[in-house]
Amino acid sequence: MDTAGYDVVVIGAGPVGENLADRAVQGGLSAAVVERELVGGECSYWACMPTKALLRSGAALRAARQVPGAREAVTGGLDVAAVLRRRDSFASDWQDGGQVSWLASAGIALYRGHGRITAERVVEVTGADGVVTRVTARHAVVVATGSGALVPDIEGLREAAPWTSREIVAAKEVPGRLVIIGGGVVASEMATAFSRLGSSVTMLARDGVLHLAEPFAGERVAESLRDKGVAVRVGAEAGSVKRNEDGTVSLTLTTGEHLDADELLVAIGRTPNTGDLGLETVGLTPGAWLAVDGTMRVVGADGVPVGGGWLYAAGDVNRRVLLTHQGKYQARAAGDVIVARATGAAVDDRDWGRHAATADERAVPQVVFTEPEVASVGLTAAGAEAAGLRIRVVDYDLAATAGSALHAEGYQGHARMVVDEDRQVIVGVTLVGPDVAEMLHAATIAVAGEVPLDRLWHAVPAFPTVSEVWLRLLETYGR
């Protein structure tokens, strides 16, 4: 058995693992990553990049049709084959050569195969040829293996081989009839994408559409989907599923109603990729989410770092925030704190300190690329109340800004800010409307920076832009 040693060993070479290893190397440590699939992970091949490529063409066509002058130049619909080719290019045709080259240029070693923790600071990597390599870490082992699609215990569902987020993103053909189980982000985005591409889509949204967002967000997205022909069935639930001999799928709802489809997408949540990592060797449960402290060290039920603090977990596996950009944020903090602890430098794990991922709890930005887009950061009104804050909710019609009329004919949208009345700062913002994603970072800065409302009055929005809504929200608040 070959043996190699590094300061840091990362299991998982997705964006989180790559970024963490890079921070460690930039800090003067040596690092290796272990990857059993494609270097670049879920985001590069089955999530962020290819999904947004699928959605962008339809969004651009919608935008053109909402501006007189451009509208008249649009004489056709989407070229489905071209959309899928563009999707393929953003997934690098599911080849990771470019990402592998980047690892080499960054000075990060790559071990291909399945990694398992077998002892303190020891990871054994089993390659496709069965050869095992023992890789040891002088300072830290990091679990950054991400998450996979959750397939619920519905009669016949697993046997029916449904699509998950991976299969639908990599689909080579557009199904004529698509049923989606779920009403969250993946379900809503794929309903948007595939209805634009020509599928007849039915959404079984048991808990509603985007039910974790502000209520008006889900309502507007559901209304838009219905306008585009999507059958949004709020409260509907699959009771059993069967894959027929001709390849089609039959569903029976809990009400007894029957549905037929060419393909079925399951998009109801995620499960951690921790089932075969050797977690039992450190007293943890295989297949479970990994709890961490503020610097991403894995902790036990007692809150004490496992094994004295050499094991870390960043990204989806710690369940703090299942978003790529937050995982990369955690990776930067964790990579830097591993360097600090290895070199004896000071650790700054205070709230908003360099080594603490405080934004995970207070300032998480997210965009849902539906039509309309939903962009949010921080707490919803319900979340702020549940946190015990004394709040005031301020709403404004985005269509009432001068910039919106210029941006698109018939522009419709809504903005909400949630104000902590005691501290006079914004703790949450939700924007719903065409192209609001590009307005989100201003809101993120306001929330993460805890900018006092009195100071925000001096952040003057350029005229005429949709961002004028910031002034209108403050005016509505009454300061």
Image: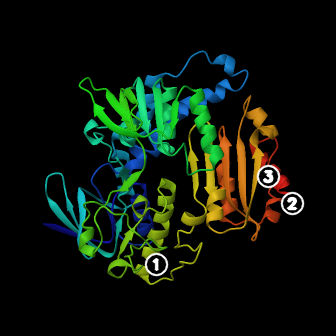
Residue at left offset 68%, top offset 65% = 449
**Closer mark to the observer between disc 1 and disc 2:** 2
Name the N-terminal-most of marks 3 and 2.
Answer: 3
Give the structural element (helix, strand or loop) at label 2. Answer: loop
Q: CA distance from mark 3 to mark 2?
A: 10 Å
Q: Is residue 221 above or below residue 383?
A: above
Residue 48 position, x and y percent, is 47, 45
- Mark 3, residues whose alpha carbon is within 10 Å: few (<14), some, or many (≥20)? some
Q: CA distance from mark 1 to mark 2?
A: 44 Å
- Read off the residue under disc 2: 479
**Residue 223 as seen in the image, left or right of residue 295:** right
Residue at image mark 1 = 340
The Cα atoms of the two marked residues, 3 and 1, are separated by 42 Å
**Tags 3 and 2 touching, CB below 8 Å:** no
In this view of the protein, can residue 171 be seen by the observer? no
In the picture, the disc for residue 473 is: 3
Q: Residues within 10 Å of mark 1 (few under 14, many from 20)?
A: some
